[in-house]
Every structure is written in structure tokens, then in C-alpha cells.
Amino acid sequence: MTYRDSGVYDPEWLLAEAAAAVQSDTEADVLAEAAELLEAEQSRVRIGDRCRPGTRVRLSTCQGTSIFGLVLATGDEILVLAAEDDVQVAVAIESLVRICGLEPALRVEQTPKLRVQVTWSSWLRRCSEIDVTCRDGWQSSLQVAAVGADHVDGWTPTGNLVTVAFSGLVQAAAGGTRRWTQQP
């Protein structure tokens, strides 16, 4: 019972009010700390962390290419999509300008032994023929001759052997009906 009107307060009511104030302050402190932790964790998230296999995305690259597809695999340097007509497209993460369809996510911490990552080398070694787009705008079909640690060698349709540095790749496509232009 509260006697506020008479200026006398019930001790149980005062105790309940004090407890509520302490709990409110504690909850506010916990929420503020949680918000700080969430912000710190979100600041570590990279695009590759958010591109989970099975996610449908639409992306655009620095060359102006727009690709819609299903994420198949992701690594530190590339993102592999299943695009139209059974074409697999590997896109350099560094060449991405925009990407739509990603859900908010936190970084998944895994030991390197457990985390399977796709790389340019691992993906290109499974390909026999690719269409490439490079940062300088060069596009061509290539018959893969060899894949190194930082480059791919391929034969152009005109019979020239070309070495393309992974750092120069914007995207590469394999399989299905590819539609890129072919240049020597």
C-alpha cells in the first residue's frame, strides 16, 4: 500500500522502486554493451562472409557487368555463382561494385583446416574452357592450358597463348552457353 498523498511511502514500495531502477540501469548497461559488441563484430564482416551458398544475388562489377545467380561457393578472393544456362561465373570480390540479396550476417570464425574456400586456382583447375573479362576491358574465350598460383594460361580462338594474372581478372565463366565476345 502506498501513501504518496500523505507524504509517507510504504517501504516495500520503495524497495520495489529501487529494485526496478537498478534492474533498468543494469538492463540498459547490458543492452549498451551488447550493441557495442554487435557493432564491433559487424565491422569485421566481409562480403564473402555474407555470400552464403544457396543465396540468390544480383551483382555488378567494375566493368559494368550485371550478373544474377545462385551463390555456389565463396572464398577470400572470388565468389562463384550458378548463372543462367548452367554457366558458372567466378567473380573477383575486389571487382564488385554492388550486390543485392545479401542477408545481414556476422563473421563465422572457423579454423583454416575446417573452412573450405574456393580460390581462382581451385576453380580454374576444374575448367577446360572459360570466357574471361579483365580489368582493362579485354574479353576472350580461353582453352585452359595451365593454372598457376597467381595466373591462368589459355589459348585464344586465334591460337595465341595468353597468360592472365588473377589480379587482372574481373570474372570468368565456364560451362553452359556463354555469351561473351571473343578477342585475340
Image (spheres, rainbow, N blue to C red):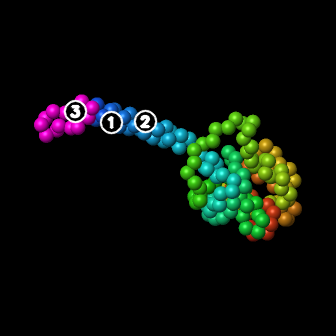
Q: Quadrant of the C terminus?
A: bottom right
For disc 2, the marked residue is 30
Q: How many discs appear?
A: 3
Q: Is residue 10 magenta?
A: yes
Q: Which mark is residue 82?
A: none
Q: Give the magenta part as a residue range.
A: 1-14
In the shown orientation, is residue 4 left or right of residue 13? left
How far across and down, in percent of the image, does residue 170 sit? 68, 56
Mark before the other along the chain sequence, 2 or 1: 1
* Mark 3–mark 2 CB contact (< 8 Å): no
From the viewer's side, name the closer residue of 148 and 5.
5
Marked residue nearer the N-terminal end (3 or 2): 3
Residue at image x 65%, y 57%? 55
Name the mark on residue 20: 1
Residue at 83% across / 56% down in the picture?
127
- How many angstroms separate mark 2 from mark 1 (CA)? 15 Å
Q: Residues within 10 Å of mark 2 (few under 14, many from 20)?
A: few
Please state the horizontal and vertical placement of residue 103, each as a whole percent of the image.
Answer: 57, 54
Amino acid type, callout 3:
Asp
Q: Does residue 31 appear left or right of residue 170 in this picture?
A: left
